[in-house]
Image: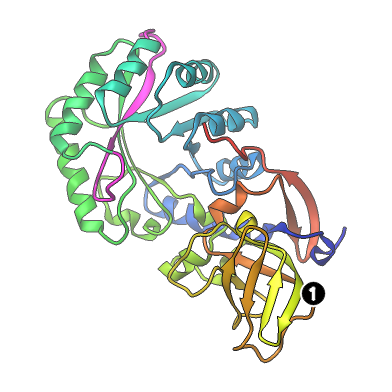
């Protein structure tokens, strides 16, 4: 097997031992706290890892788009939640085909989307499972109050081909008490009106180790935890040593003593920032700062480094936001103890609809 340093660049390296450690750690917390784990596959987009998450104890997976769900179903996953308002006949037709072959659930935060589901799914013997999305403070999609959640739940429950399953939220970071109160108020109101939610699903890796403090929640949907990244480390979720994915780059220029340029820009690393300085962390040169990402160039400030890379040297970069990276590469290299064990396609890459 080749060493990772033999891989042509830019390329993605994924440490299989770190992946397993991250999965087991998070699954262990869920098991210890009576939570169902339903990981979001947007971070890795790989059949192999989705099946591994289920093997380790997840009830199923979460997808954001129908295309991701189609890919994961083709890869053997049998229980999928799609956490996105699905609008339009084309998407509903694809959803109907999924519904025929696997256990699929969807969300909505409005009656227009719910009516679309109701028009497409009318079989009372095989109803589509629907959760009401709730805005518990993050300010994205979601009904705004528990009373709105009740109204929409009633509408869903009245449709012969739909089954009201419960509530879903993507909560704001570090506002546990507020989220808990919102969901508990909604749970109580729904229960009093004979619509007790079977599932209350929350999400996000940054909040994960506070999940048990939100007592109303039955299910959690972390995504980034499988790889971790610089952003999660800056939030206090894991450390840089837990980061399983790195982008391998080659130094192609040293225009000055304190400046290096690598063959890895925004088309390989994304361009998200985080609380740590720069556009990524160089494993071999931790004091270096990636100051600028153009499309194909990454410019690095070496002024704080004692040792400095030479032209032709390969370096590993931990991305600020790892989820973007999986959608930028056709394939990834799976490594174990520095050896490339396999090179595999990113199965759900580009599945944006």
Q: Position of residue 6 (x, y in %)?
A: 85, 63
Residue farthest right in this picture: 1
209 to 109, vertically: above or below: below
Q: Position of residue 5 (x, y in %)?
A: 81, 67
Camera-side residue of 31 and 189: 189
Residue farthest bottom in this picture: 306
Provide the major secondary structure of the magenta segment. loop
96 to 192, vertically: above or below: above
Residue farthest front in this picture: 255
331 to 280, vertically: above or below: above
Q: How is the image coloured?
A: rainbow
Q: Which residues are magenta?
A: 122-141
Q: Residue at x 27, y 38 (%)?
A: 142
Residue 284 occupies quadrant: bottom right
Q: Is residue 131 magenta?
A: yes
Q: Is residue 180 magenta?
A: no
Residue 195 occupies quadrant: top left
Q: Secondary structure at mark 1?
A: loop
Camera-side residue of 168 and 349: 349
Category of crowding for the residue at label 1, using alpha-carbon neighbours closer than 10 angstroms: few (below 14), some (14–19), many (at least 20): few
Q: Position of residue 80 (x, y in %)?
A: 49, 32
Count of numbered labels shown in the rendering: 1
Q: Quadrant of the N terminus?
A: bottom right
Camera-side residue of 198 and 105: 105
Q: Residue at x 35, y 11 (%)?
A: 119
Residue under label 1, please give it: 313
Q: Position of residue 333 (x, y in %)?
A: 74, 54
Q: In the rendered view, does 68 fall on the left or right side of 158?
A: right
Q: Residue at x 68, y 57 (%)?
A: 16
Q: Residue at x 28, y 21 (%)?
A: 112
């Amino acid at each position: 097997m080749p060493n990772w340093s033999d891989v042509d660049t830019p390329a993605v390296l994924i440490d299989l031992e770190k992946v397993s450690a991250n999965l087991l750690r998070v699954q262990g917390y869920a098991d210890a706290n009576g939570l169902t784990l339903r990981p979001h596959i947007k971070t890795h987009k790989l059949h192999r890892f989705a099946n591994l998450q289920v093997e380790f104890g997840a009830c199923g997976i979460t997808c954001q788009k129908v295309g991701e769900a189609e890919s994961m179903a083709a890869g053997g996953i049998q229980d999928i939640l799609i956490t996105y308002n699905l609008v339009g006949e084309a998407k509903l037709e694809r959803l109907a085909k999924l519904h025929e072959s696997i256990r699929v659930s969807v969300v909505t935060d409005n009656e227009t989307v719910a009516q679309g589901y109701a028009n497409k799914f009318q079989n009372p013997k095989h109803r589509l499972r629907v959760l009401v999305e709730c805005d518990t403070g993050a300010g994205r999609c979601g009904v705004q109050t528990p009373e709105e959640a009740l109204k929409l739940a009633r509408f869903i429950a009245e449709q012969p081909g739909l089954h009201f399953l419960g509530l879903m939220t993507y909560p704001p970071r570090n506002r546990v008490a507020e989220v808990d109160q919102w969901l508990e108020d909604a749970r109580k109101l729904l229960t009093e009106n004979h619509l007790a939610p079977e599932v209350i699903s929350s999400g996000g890796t940054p909040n994960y180790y506070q999940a048990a403090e939100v007592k109303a929640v039955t299910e959690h949907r972390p995504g980034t935890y499988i790889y971790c990244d610089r952003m999660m480390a800056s939030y206090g979720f894991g450390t840089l040593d837990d980061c399983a994915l790195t982008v391998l780059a080659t130094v192609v220029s040293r225009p000055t003593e304190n400046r290096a340029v690598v063959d890895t820009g925004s088309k390989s690393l994304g361009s998200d920032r985080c609380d740590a300085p720069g556009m990524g962390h160089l494993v071999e040169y931790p004091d270096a700062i990636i100051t600028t990402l153009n499309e194909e160039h990454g410019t690095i400030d070496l002024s704080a480094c004692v040792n400095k890379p030479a032209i032709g040297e390969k370096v590993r970069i931990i991305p600020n936001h790892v989820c973007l990276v999986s959608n930028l590469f056709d394939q990834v290299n799976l490594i174990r103890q520095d050896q490339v064990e396999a090179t595999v396609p990113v199965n759900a890459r580009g599945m944006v609809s």
